[in-house]
Amino acid sequence: MSQVSITINGRKYQVACDDGQEAHLTRLGDYVDKRLDELVAAVGQVGDSRLLVMVSLLLADELSDLYSENESLKSKTDGGTSTARGEEELAVAVEKIAERIENIAAGLEQA
């Protein structure tokens, strides 16, 4: 086990993590600190407990939005209908390009 020192809201915390996860944990700490700084700029220093609750809710909201976006993207491709439709559109486009190339080639042969 490794230990990482992260700073959130001006306070240092020693956090244990698996070996090799130090950089990842440091990035997460930096992100939380950044979001907390934005929150403090908006509402001021309202106490560590309240800030912890508020930043947790902000991060949970971001995560919820990402989950919703992910589900939306999944539902668009479920059943293969969107994928099949996209492949059909691509095939039509390729055929049109092939026709144009053939027309250009025919024009060059005549010249």
Image (tube, rainbow, N blue to C red):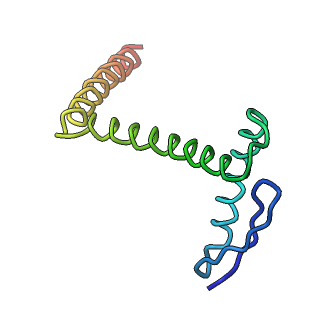
State which quarter of the image contains the C terminus: top left
Residue drawn 20% across the image and 35% down it: 84
Image label count? 0
Image quadrant assignment for residue 109: top left
Figure check: 58 above or below 30: above
Q: Work out which residue is located at the far right of the displayed protein and give it.
A: 10
Give the left or right position of residue 85, taking residue 55 as reference: left
Q: Residue 23, position in %: x, y?
A: 68, 68
70, above or below 26, in the image? above
Rendered image quadrant of residue 38 = top right
Give the x, y percent position of residue 45.
79, 43
Q: Is residue 63 left or right of residue 16?
A: left
| Residue at 38% over, 42% down | 70
Look at 32% across and 22% down and name the residue there: 102
Q: In this view, does 63 lie to the left or right of 50?
A: left
Of residues 37 and 78, which is closer to you in this image? 37
Spot occupied by residue 14 in the image (x, y as percentages of width and height): 72, 74
Q: Residue at x 64, y 66 (%)?
A: 25
- Residue 93, percent across and down? 31, 24
Viewer-closest of 7 and 31: 7
The one of 20 and 106 positioned closer to us in this rendering:
20
Q: In which quarter of the image is residue 30?
A: bottom right
The quadrant of the image that shows the N terminus is bottom right
